[in-house]
């Protein structure tokens, strides 16, 4: 993977990002692996703006699209290694680890988080992490009967993939890219389980523009409506929009604050982790959300030092980035270049 090696040697990606590129493409043929290498790491300026999680996610996405059969075989092999392990931790604590298929793991985490959010809203003084740990023990050991609560797991998948006419990968909130052959059974299993248990299960349509950007929703409220909040989380892939931050989205907030003229519309909203959202309130920081004519949502952030950074929303499943044409320019003699121009004497 020469482009990955060059990007690492140039200091544009970290060692872990290079490792992810190698690991996520290990099941591919040499030619397909070279395509992923060139597409992701071939443009040093572009790859330098990606976080480690984004590098790994893009590699998984391309691998699932180039050779879905190999990715499916690799996943089936990995699922055979599912297990629960335990190891000691300092201060009489312990690490209990579950190595699970992604669908099951995300469901477990979402259920624990939902239970914690419900108790916190009711006035529970424990932290979210403490409640999730306590709830895990309660539900596994059966010490208490935890009530069933509705759990939402966001899976973004194109209609072509859902109907089996495409192998474009999907995006599972809380994990990232998953192959099409896993996304379809997840949807079918959820609908079947809902019919048997009586729990509510539904599919939500998300409409995209012809260029792969989610359509806007308007609101006059300063508080982001529930539906619009889900739209932003889906658009931003569940990950903080700050460059190089891989933390999950905790806040949906305005890029340009309402006090400075911002509006509660899709264009001016972004998903951020708590730390990044609080940090942008410091003096000297400004941010503006906008949509390029033929591209995905962008947030331009200017720091107190005057540096400007652009964060672009990840592509939706089923929508590819516009092709990039990299031209190789041969060295030329300066006189050859000057010969193409006719100089005009202004004094004449």
Image (tube, rainbow, N blue to C red):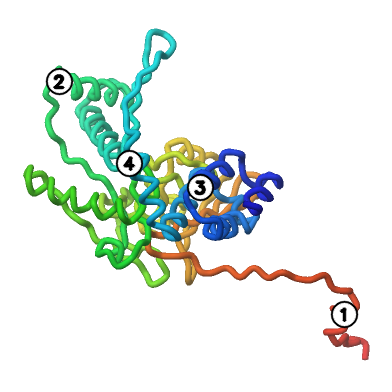
Secondary structure of the residue carrying numbered label 2? loop
Separation (CA) of disc 3 from disc 2: 42 Å
User: What residue sits 21% from the left and 41% below the top?
Assistant: 151
Residue at the spot x=18%, y=48% of the render?
190
In front: 300, or 101? Answer: 101
Where residue 209 sits: x, y (%)?
37, 69
Element at label 3: loop
Counting residues from the N terminus, which is met first, the one under dot 2 or under dot 4?
4
Left or right: where 336 falls relative to 251: right
Q: Residues within 10 Å of mark 1 (few under 14, many from 20)?
A: few
Q: Tell me whether circle 3 and circle 2 mark residues in contact (CB < 8 Å).
A: no
Residue 71 at what x, y percent from top left? 40, 51
288 up-or-down from 347: above or below: above
- Identify which residue is drawn at 50% across, 50% down: 25
Seen from the viewer's position, the closer of residues 33 and 343 is 33
Nearer to us: label 2 or label 4: 4
Q: Earlier in the sequence, mark 1 or mark 2?
A: 2
How packed mark 2 is, by other alpha carbons closer than 10 Å (few <14, some 14-19, many 20 or more), is few
Residue 336 — which label? Answer: 1
Q: Is residue 54 visible?
A: no
Q: Residue at x 59, y 44 (%)?
A: 18
Which residue carries the number 2 mark?
A: 142
């Amino acid at each position: 993977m020469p482009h990955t090696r060059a990007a690492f040697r140039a200091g544009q990606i970290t060692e872990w990002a290079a490792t992810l590129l190698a690991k996520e493409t290990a099941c591919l043929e040499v030619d397909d692996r070279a395509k992923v290498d060139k597409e992701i790491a071939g443009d040093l300026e572009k790859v330098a703006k990606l976080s480690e999680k984004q590098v790994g996610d893009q590699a998984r996405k391309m691998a699932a699209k180039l050779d879905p059969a190999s990715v499916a075989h690799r996943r089936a092999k990995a699922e055979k290694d599912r297990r629960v392990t335990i190891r000691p931790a300092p201060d009489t604590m312990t690490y209990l680890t579950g190595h699970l298929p992604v669908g099951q793991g995300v469901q477990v985490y979402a259920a624990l988080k939902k239970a914690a959010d419900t108790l916190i809203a009711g006035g529970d003084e424990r932290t979210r992490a403490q409640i999730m740990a306590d709830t895990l023990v309660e539900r596994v050991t059966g010490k208490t009967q935890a009530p069933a609560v509705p759990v939402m797991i966001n899976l973004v998948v194109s209609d072509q993939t859902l109907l089996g006419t495409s192998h474009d990968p999907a995006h599972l909130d809380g994990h990232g890219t998953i192959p099409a052959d896993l996304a379809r059974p997840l949807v079918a299993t959820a609908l079947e389980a809902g019919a048997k248990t009586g729990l509510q299960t539904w599919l939500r349509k998300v409409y995209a523009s012809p260029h792969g950007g989610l359509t806007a929703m308007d609101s006059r409220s300063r508080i982001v409506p529930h539906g619009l909040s889900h739209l932003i989380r889906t658009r931003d892939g569940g990950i903080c929009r700050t460059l190089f931050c891989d933390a999950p989205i905790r806040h949906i907030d305005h890029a340009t604050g309402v006090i400075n003229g911002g509006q509660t519309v899709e264009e001016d909203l972004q998903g951020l982790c708590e730390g990044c959202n609080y940090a942008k309130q410091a003096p000297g920081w400004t941010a503006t959300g906008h949509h390029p004519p033929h591209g995905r949502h962008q947030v331009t952030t200017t720091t107190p030092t005057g540096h400007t950074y652009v964060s672009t929303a990840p592509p939706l499943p089923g929508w590819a980035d516009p092709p990039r044409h990299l031209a190789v320019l041969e060295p030329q003699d300066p006189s050859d270049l000057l010969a193409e121009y006719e100089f005009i004497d202004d004094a004449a």
